[in-house]
Amino acid sequence: MANYVRKELPDLRGNGKKKVCYKIETNRNFDSDELADYMSSLGMGIPKAAIKAVLVHLSSTMASLLAQGYTVSIDGLGIVSLKIGPKKNKRTANAYDYDNKLKPSNLEVTGVNLRVDKKFLKDINKHCELENKGERTIKRSKYTAEERLKRAQDYLSKNMFLNINEYAYMNGLSYSVAQRELKKLAEDSESGITFVGRGPSKMYVLSKKGE
């Protein structure tokens, strides 16, 4: 049984038409050890240790092939390929060549694409029973992006640090939206906001001039 929620998106265009999307509620993550244990329990006659070894080898082999510019097909799953883009927070004055093109040294792998096999989707639907767990309305801030930035700057002019919860509360945003927005502001050198710390201790501060 898989649970889902119906989300009502804000009317961004102001035409009275609201968009709706549906999202699966994740139970939890299955790690490699649990996956190998589960596969072994299905009665295939393959020991758990052997399955774990294959999963590790598969991961490293795919990384090597993708790094060489290949795509990798896995029957019943799909085709995996690379995504590349500019390095985050690594741009310098010499990032571009004479043709105003980003130099290779300033590009990196930013993710992978998975073009899913249709059979894989059919197999999922064959086993999947969906249950509605309610509706949610996406919060929309009453402030514009420029106003939210100004409110954050004003807050930091009086306080040393700003965290995600504080930014979300002051602007009427959900935690996830506030997190994404602060991340973008910190990556924008014109915002005047940067961050210190990592993970749970990450805090946002005013950046020094010239940074």
Image (cartoon, rainbow, N blue to C red):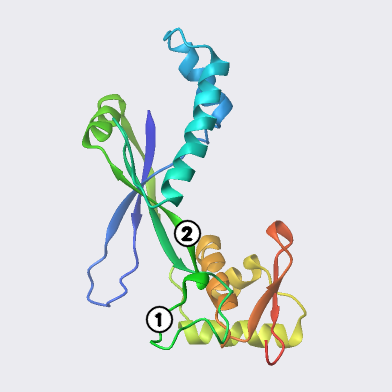
Q: Quadrant of the N terminus?
A: top left
Splitting the image into 4 quarters, where does residue 163 fall?
bottom right
Where does residue 96 sit, x and y in percent of width and height?
47, 83
Counting every numbered tag in the picture gives 2
Q: Are marks 2 and 1 in contact (CB under 8 Å)?
A: no
Task: Indicate whether 6 appears above or below 95.
Answer: above
For label 1, the crowd category at 10 Å Cα-Cα, with few meaning under 14, some 14 to 19 and many 20 or more, is: few
| Secondary structure type for disc 2 | strand
Can residue 37 be spotted in the picture? yes
Q: Residue at x 50, y 65 (%)?
A: 177
Q: Judge left or right: residue 188 versus residue 45.
A: right
Residue type at mark 1? Lys
Task: Indicate whether 108 appears above or below 120.
Answer: below
Can residue 138 be spotted in the picture? no
In 3D space, how far apart are the residues under numbered discs 2 and 1 (Cα atoms)?
17 Å
Where does residue 198 sit, x and y in percent of width and height?
71, 61
Q: Residue at the right extreme?
A: 160
Tell me the residue that label 2 is attached to: 109
Residue type at mark 2? Val
Q: Residue at x 46, y 18 (%)?
A: 39
Tell me the residue that label 1 is attached to: 101
Q: Which of 210 and 57 is in front in this view?
A: 57
